[in-house]
Amino acid sequence: MKSLLKISFMSTLVLSACGGAKWDVEDVSVESYKVETITDNLVKPWGVAPLPDGNYFVTEIGGTAKIISGSDTSPVEGLPDNILVNGQGGLMGVVLAPDFSKSQTLYLSYATKPQEANTTSVFRARLQGNRLLDGRKIYSSSPKETGSHFGGRMVFLPDGSLVLTLGDGFAHREQAQVLDNTLGKIVRMAPDGNVHIDNPFKGEAGVAPEIYSFGHRNVQGLAYDAETGNLWAHEHGPAGGDELNLIKPGANYGWPLATSGKNYDQASVSPFKSLEGMEDFVFDWVPSIAPSGLTIYRGDAFPAWQGDAFVGALAGKSLWRIDLNGTKAVGAERLLSELNARIRDVKEDRDGSLLVLTESDKGGQLLRISPQ
């Protein structure tokens, strides 16, 4: 059953960008767009991928996935049999292979059992109807025994390589600066899970060869902008210091040495927000909004949003639009605050509308934002 929401809401918040720019951030009235419920038959959804046939593939953190076809919802069969569902762990990201229309191949990220030696893994399979065939694990991060902060977002780059975000394991944040492991890293691999041939650290002694960038905390947003060639990511701070970053191969993003982050006792994580040799954030949030899901909008439905970043907020219970001028943040606003729902993922649909996954006391929903 599809329905429309039309509610106005207003409040303010102060945020900052690299260089110290600050704005009053307002909740946008929904009078200029409509919100359509595609389905409300989801349980803690995590990731969504629009399929070429008009359907949607949705993952749920509890270790299940569904195909959404009109008003019908079908469970996906053939998922990995070693998914660890515990705390932040479970079935996470989904991304289609670049040749999906021909190969029907897709990739899933998930936390892997056993609990005492968990890790983030990638599973590759072919989708036939609502069943995954020929599935196999092609990659696992290292070391094991991380427990939290699994990352889990994936995108393909134009050269066919697959990029996967990871986390620092929560209790091992210093390892984000150590290059012999993948804690607190973004990694890049070939489509079969092997190390990509021209990764920035490939061949260096004592360095995990799959590392693409490092100095991250828990990266749960990743998007490639084909128009500019830029790779964007955002990551969780603790009680503050969430960041939107422009990702460069081999670069260090500072965690936990350079950050505006606040610990849960409100003490600063570091006295330094910026250090030489480390990349500065493009935009940050203090206090934390717990960002999840990211897309760079390039659709025709909303011309004024062209090139802007859309970020879901879990604790912040809203969808953020970061106004980007090239690689600089010049403003921000919030959408969907009136729903009072955690925003888990956001994707651009085939027609230029925005797809949004939510979870709340009412359950999980897949929504579509389109012009009024």
Image (spheres, rainbow, N blue to C red):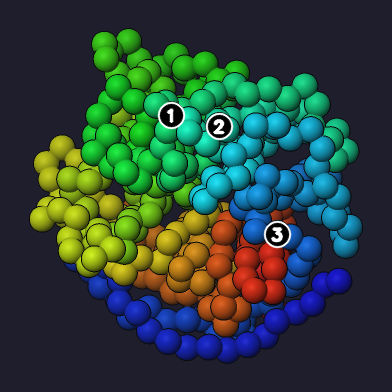
Q: Of 202 and 236, which appears nearest the observer?
A: 236
Q: Do the residues labelled 3 and 2 touch (CB within 8 Å)?
A: no
Residue 243: percent from the left, percent from the top?
Answer: 33, 55
For label 1, count other residues whose C-alpha is less than 10 Å away and answer few (under 14), some (14-19) or many (20+).
Answer: some
Residue 17: percent from the left, percent from the top?
Answer: 27, 63
Q: Mark 2 points at which residue?
A: 114
Q: Mark 3 points at which residue?
A: 43
Q: How far apart are marks 3 and 1 (CA)?
A: 28 Å
Q: Of 134 and 293, which appears nearest the observer?
A: 134
Q: Are marks 3 and 1 in contact (CB under 8 Å)?
A: no
Residue found at x 10% / y 55%: 271
Q: Name the residue under label 1.
A: 144
State the image quarter where residue 355 is shown: bottom right
Is 206 placed left or right of 221 in the picture?
Answer: left
User: Identity of the amino acid at label 1?
Assistant: Lys
State the image quarter where residue 3 is shown: bottom right
Is 348 placed left or right of 132 in the picture?
Answer: left
User: Identity of the amino acid at label 2?
Assistant: Pro
Q: Is mark 1 on a helix, strand or loop?
A: loop
Taking 284 as reference, is 107 above or below it?
above
Nearest-to-viewer mark from 3 and 1: 1
Q: What element carries label 3?
A: loop
Quadrant of the image containing the C terminus: bottom right
Residue 151: percent from the left, percent from the top?
Answer: 47, 43
Residue 188: mark in rendering: none
User: Identity of the amino acid at label 3?
Assistant: Val
Q: Of 300 and 102, which appears nearest the observer?
A: 102
Q: Is mark 2 on a helix, strand or loop?
A: loop
